[in-house]
Amino acid sequence: MNELLGFLAWKVLFLPLLAAAVIAFFLQARPRLAAVVSVMAVVVSFILTVVLYAQYRNYPTVVQVAIPWLSIGNLNIEFGLHADHLSLLMALVVTGVGSLIHIYSIAYMQGDRSYARFFASLSLFTFSMLGIVLSNNFFQMFIFWELVGVSSYLLIGFWYEKPSAADAAKKAFLTNRIGDFGFLLGIIILWATTGSVKFSELHSILAKNPGVLDGVATAVSLLIFCGAVGKSAQFPLHVWLPDAMEGPTPVSALIHAATMVAAGVYMLCRVSFLFDPFSLQIIATTGGFTALLAALIAVQQNDIKRILAYSTLSQLGYMVMAVGLNGPSAAMFHLTTHAFFKAMLFLGAGSVIHALHHEQDIWKMGGLKSKMPITYWTFLLGTLALCGMWPLSGFFSKDAILSQAFDQGNYFLFVIGVLVAFLTTFYMFRLFLVVFLGGAKAHAVDHAHESPRVMSWPLVVLAVASVCGGFIGIEQFVQHQFSPSAEVEPIFDIMGPFAHSPAAAFAGLLVIFFGFSLAIAIYWNATSDPIPEKLPRLSRWLRNKFYFDELYARLIALTQDSLAKVADGCDRFLVQGLMVRGTHGSVEFFGRALRLLQTGNLQTYALLFAAGVAFVICFVLFR
Amino acid sequence: MNPLNLMRLVAPECILVIFALTALFMDVATLREQSAKVRQWVVGSLSGVACLTVMIWIACIRPEGSYSMVELPAVSFLLKEVLLGLTLVTALISFDAKFTRHIGEYYALLLLAAVGLMLLISSNNLLMIFVAVELVSLSLYAMTALDKTSPASAEAALKYFLFGSVAAAFMLFGISLLYGVTGQLQLDAIAGKLQTQHLEPIHYVALVMTLTGFAFKIAAAPFHLWAPDVYQAAPTPIASFIASASKVGSFFVLARIVLAGFGSARGGAGWGHLAAGWVPVLAILATVSMVIGNLVAIVQTRVKRLLAYSAIAHGGYALMALLADEQRAVSSLLFYVITYAITVLGAFGVVAMVEHSGGRDRFSDFAGLSRRAPLLSFCMLVFLLSLAGIPPLSGFFGKFYVFTAAISGPDHLQAFWLLIVGGATSVVSIYYYLQVLKQIYVAPAPANVGSLNISMPAQIGIVALAIAVIVLGFAPGLLLGRLNDGLTLVASNL
């Protein structure tokens, strides 16, 4: 049985890769067929994951299949898959939400001249993402981690003719590399101290001998957290995610909302046993700070996709905060529900953008309620779920995080969490009111009509998931992973949160009410944003995202570029200033060569060389 | 002590010399009246056949053992085959080169340089090593100057020659000091003597001076000043040979000298625990190379110059490997250097193809290359991403293995500061590789250029290298396994 399950797991992973390869090599000129192949691969992957999941629910034994990949001295690396509560849940999200988004893309990308390339990249991404999810060791996870970065690079820069898209892709890739650099160093120290990179082995080593990481525990935890900071776009590496919205909207939905950016959170949950209390504190604070920062910035953005991007940042901040508060199951729960409703919101936004011929400014929309009823209703559900309205899924998962903060006695982060919930409701209803209600603010709106059915029914499926996701036992399922012995709470308990953490539940609902009222008061039937006039300075800071991009650009120019120029200048000076510099013909060359020997430049060079040697000798002897 | 034994050991080198002389003679005697193209094909094919013949010879005979100054450890088969393979591809990408009329001389010099490299890894005697280094160097100086129509080429050759002579002088001085204090030239004998002696400053001076000569050969900063100009101005196939094959040989012999000869003068490179010896010297060279190489590469606008600075940086990464204990040091160093050589040879090959089609090596000459030569562009993508260390290509595994090797050595986690430098600079490096890729894939092609015409041998060579880079990334065990097999035999005397 186990072998069969292992075989299925391999298939889940490799079907999308097969699809990507087939499209890349054979179907470049057959776009329709390419789309079919890509969609089939991810749907079959989803079905197989469901089979694995069903089997696992009945006989919950962890499936591990591995082939030795490399073994030299004490460096043993496997290529293996690991199916347990955590990875199955995540694999379901990736393939499930992924399938819907693949289907949606069939219509959304219609007519693009690189239709086949789009689906090949999407399949490649699905493969890499599943690789992260199913990996049984750090080394393999890192490889897929980078592959996800590469496929995200390809998809953000999909319309590379647009300079902004090419720049955004580069920015995302480079920013991620900074995080990955820490991640890799963390993995290497972990290997050097424990001798293993395999999750299950690390777990048992640490359980047997908790002191094995003494002295480096904090360093390891924080370095590994660096990886999550990059991938999940936490402060200070959050700057790439909003720019990544230059990619096609289905990509934003799949990669930059539902799955890839959640990989950081997933990784933290996977190795949550590693972290020491101090680094947990840092993780929680980083998450809380990112949540607040992003929610503030979202309040004054006008691009529909950017508002959603900042909202994603803010929700990722929640999840990271939950991990830091010792609540990985709450984090995974929120990750799952967020994948449902945020994917839906992005697809809804894509539907609007599609209808308005690529208009993204919310102040040029308005009055879409009657023109696009399906989009309208699903978007409303998504907005309510994101705000955390009972009994939609967002309420339960956010409540899990807030009550985690409350129970841990971390009232500071609890207050931040509640404040972020308030801001979330405010900016989401600002978006909703301006886009769907009120009068039409531009001519394009008059010709808008509902998107084709292949785009609207994924929205409906996601809407159902967003409504029900909170009380179908997702949290209970993933809780097994972290506390296998805990008693199983009843599922389908929609009143549960009010019973065991009333403070969090009521605080959450109260701020929704306030946020909603404030949004109605300001934006009901508004044709332009009144805030920049009333609070000009605040608005300017928020619109410019607290000037992080400018600050980083300045910093990079100051350090890296100027250092590079100085180093280059020195090199040129040494080589060209002291040596021959003739490119105007051989006569002059020989003249210079002779002069070189006569004027003593050669001696200067020899002197420099000797000085270098003397420096090294002094260093070795006298340090 | 049968002299025939010596003949058996150096037969591959002898065969190659005979081929080199034949190439020279054939070009002068029989092909004079033929067109340059015919001469290229005949002499080039002869050189290719020479490399293949010797590769097969080595694979079948597997000469092993020692005689006087020649000592062949088991790993030397593999290294020689790699060197010959690299020479073969260099010959392939020179097929439609137009930089010289002296075709016979060019291929003869190429083969002689290969002979020098093979002798370099065959010897355990400092004198012999020095002679081999000079054989390689002289061939390379002459080859750099072969493009007689280009003053830059001659200038670079002169620069290379002058810098090289200074370095050789230092190395020779170091060797003679070493001989003075130990009375020995054989590496194992030197190691034996050093173990019994108390290490005085004179020992360290000798050591540093010897290492300086090799630091020059591998272009480690601050002894790198020749490299950018030589890579830039030398005809591209020659630059690629300097960057690939000559690096492999030099790194191996450097490892052999420090590990087999100076074992007892190791010292330490831990943060705050620097102890006198060759390890801190190499750690400093590695750090300076990684920082200078990667930083200066950022502002380059010529691809060959960029590759030169990246080569300096990669020399730094490779040096980190020597911090490990003996066996891991050699296996991780050789894995890194071999995969690097394969990758960089490929990258230079692509540059050479662009140049043959009338371009130069400015960024703008690569604009829109993906539309003009899709296959070649894809190969370049593989090479550059591998150099940047993106998994699953072999460059990533090489770095990972070197990093883990460096902190598994005697310095343990105290050498972590080097990893931080290495990791941080490799983040920087991705930036400039992406600049080139952006030109290739994003920038529009100039209006008046057609697709590239690439000769079949060059295409085969470059594609084979790209496949090797990918395969070694997915299955590093293929090469590492062989490296380790070779090392188990040599660990006692290396």
Image (tube, rainbow, N blue to C red):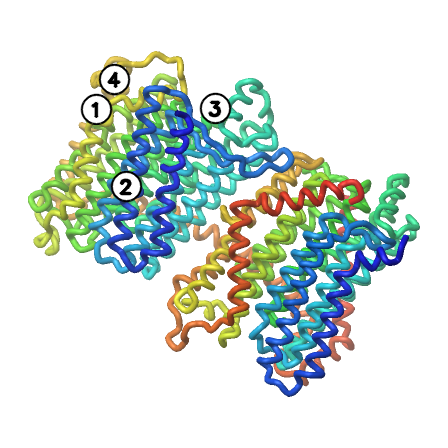
What is the tally of numbered marks visible in this picture?
4
Residue A392 shown left or right of residue B87 in the figure: left
Circle 1 — which element?
A: helix
Q: CA distance from mark 1 to mark 3?
A: 33 Å
Front one among A446 and A128: A128
Position above or below: B156 against B131: below
Residue B262: percent from left, percent from top: 81, 45
Residue A298 marker: 2
Residue A252 shown left or right of residue A138 in the figure: left
Identify which amino acid the numbered label 2 is placed on.
Ala
Q: CA distance from mark 2 to mark 1?
A: 21 Å
Residue on which disc 4 sits: A491
Residue A273 marker: 3
Identify which amino acid the numbered label 1 is placed on.
Leu
Identify which amino acid the numbered label 3 is placed on.
Phe
Q: Residue at x 44, y 33 (%)?
A: A81
Residue A291: percent from left, percent from top: 34, 34
Q: CA distance from mark 3 to mark 2?
A: 34 Å
Residue B279: quadrant of the picture:
top right
